């Protein structure tokens, strides 16, 4: 079957026969559903898909997918996913990880897979807590958060996932939240189409150890006014009435109201996800409530050569002039002794 051949699937085709063992109400259920919907839409043959995970609640994901999968070790999913893709360039490789797995013990591997631009898709579940190990603060936990390992409130500054990805020379970064199935499905489709490392941050809810941590921006009653869904080529506007927007005021983003102080829709910034200079994308990825709305959607999507394609090309070129064509040639090269 050729790589370009599209297969007609439904989301149900990607459901395994395993019992889903996440807590009732966990945001992971939403992510699983939207990924299965996205894969059905993409139509890649199931035997050409592999899900790689590390350790954490989210990392049970491969068991629930009717595809190839590998539940690896803590923090090493990026390294293993890199190897899988490099050894099997025709596979669609998806890395499933959490804020602790990817950004703490796996931080070094994470930034380098992003820097290398290996053609894999990373879905980073961010619930700002260690859930599997029962409630310790993570690298994305807000400063002051009281947890089992910070009983008086953590004194650390948290990572911004988008800032980290773009700072590591990332070419694709998007953000969604777990319960928004339509947006999430759309983003996963776009991530799959992108050639290179795509990172999708999912604002995900842990109902047991960090319940409602994102509710101040993703809650049904407030999300329209406290988030902005960015779409390439469209003005940056948001709000329940669609009258709020973003402009560039000097070197900073500024929230404005259409119809006030002479502001019209023409004054608003137009989102350019394909701009190679990451300056505005960096600011968008870093926006936080209450000063700004939190940016959702595809924030950065830039074409760039991939590591795996460059490696394949290098191997092809070296083979053209290589004297060593097989293992026997290698073993008989250099200094050779005959033992009698």
Image (spheres, rainbow, N blue to C red):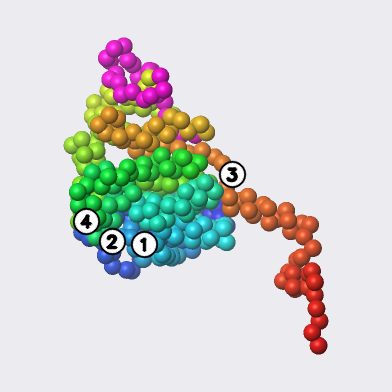
Q: Which mark is residue 250?
A: none
Mark 1 or mark 4: which comes first in sequence?
Answer: 1
Question: Residue 143 occupies which quadrant of the picture?
Answer: top left
Q: Residues within 10 Å of mark 4 (few under 14, many from 20)?
A: few
Secondary structure under the numbered disc 4 in the rendered image: loop
For the record, the magenta segment spans: 250-274
Q: Residue at x 27, y 23 (%)?
A: 243
**Contact check, label 4 and label 3, Cβ < 8 Å:** no
Mark 4 or 3: in front is 4
Q: Which residue is mark 3?
A: 305
Q: Residue at x 24, y 26 (%)?
A: 241
Secondary structure under the numbered disc 2 in the rendered image: loop
Mark 4 or mark 3: which comes first in sequence?
Answer: 4
Mark 3 or 2: in front is 2
Residue 112 location in percent, x, y? 50, 50
Q: Which residue is mark 1?
A: 55
């Amino acid at each position: 079957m050729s790589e370009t051949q599209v297969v007609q699937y439904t989301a149900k085709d990607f459901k395994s026969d395993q019992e889903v063992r996440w807590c009732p109400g966990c945001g992971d259920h939403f992510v699983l559903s939207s990924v299965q919907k996205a894969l059905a839409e993409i139509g890649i043959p199931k035997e050409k898909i592999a899900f790689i995970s590390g350790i954490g609640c989210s990392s049970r994901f491969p068991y629930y997918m009717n595809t190839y999968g590998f539940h690896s070790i803590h923090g090493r999913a990026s390294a293993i996913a890199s190897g899988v893709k490099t050894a099997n360039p025709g596979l669609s490789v998806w890395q499933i990880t959490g804020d602790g797995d990817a950004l703490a013990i796996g931080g070094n591997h994470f930034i380098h897979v992003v820097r290398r631009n290996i053609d894999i898709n990373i879905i980073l579940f961010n619930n700002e807590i260690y859930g599997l190990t029962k409630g310790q603060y993570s690298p994305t936990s807000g400063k002051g958060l009281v947890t089992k390992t910070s009983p008086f409130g953590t004194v650390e500054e948290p990572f911004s996932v988008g800032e980290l990805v773009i700072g590591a020379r990332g070419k694709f970064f998007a953000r969604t939240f777990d319960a928004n199935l339509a947006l999430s499905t759309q983003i996963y489709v776009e991530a799959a189409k992108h050639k290179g490392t795509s990172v999708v941050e999912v604002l995900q809810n842990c109902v047991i150890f960090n319940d409602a941590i994102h509710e101040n921006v993703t809650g049904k009653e407030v999300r329209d006014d406290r988030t902005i869904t960015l779409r390439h080529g469209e003005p940056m506007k948001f709000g329940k009435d669609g009258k709020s927007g973003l402009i560039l005021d000097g070197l900073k983003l500024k929230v404005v109201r259409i119809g006030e102080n002479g502001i019209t829709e023409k004054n608003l910034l137009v989102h350019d996800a394909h701009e190679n200079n990451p300056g505005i994308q960096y600011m968008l990825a870093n926006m936080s409530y209450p000063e700004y709305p939190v940016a959702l959607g595809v924030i950065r999507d830039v074409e760039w050569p991939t590591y795996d394609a460059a490696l394949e090309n290098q191997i092809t070129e070296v083979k053209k002039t290589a004297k060593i064509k097989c293992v026997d040639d290698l073993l008989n090269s250099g200094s050779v002794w005959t033992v009698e």
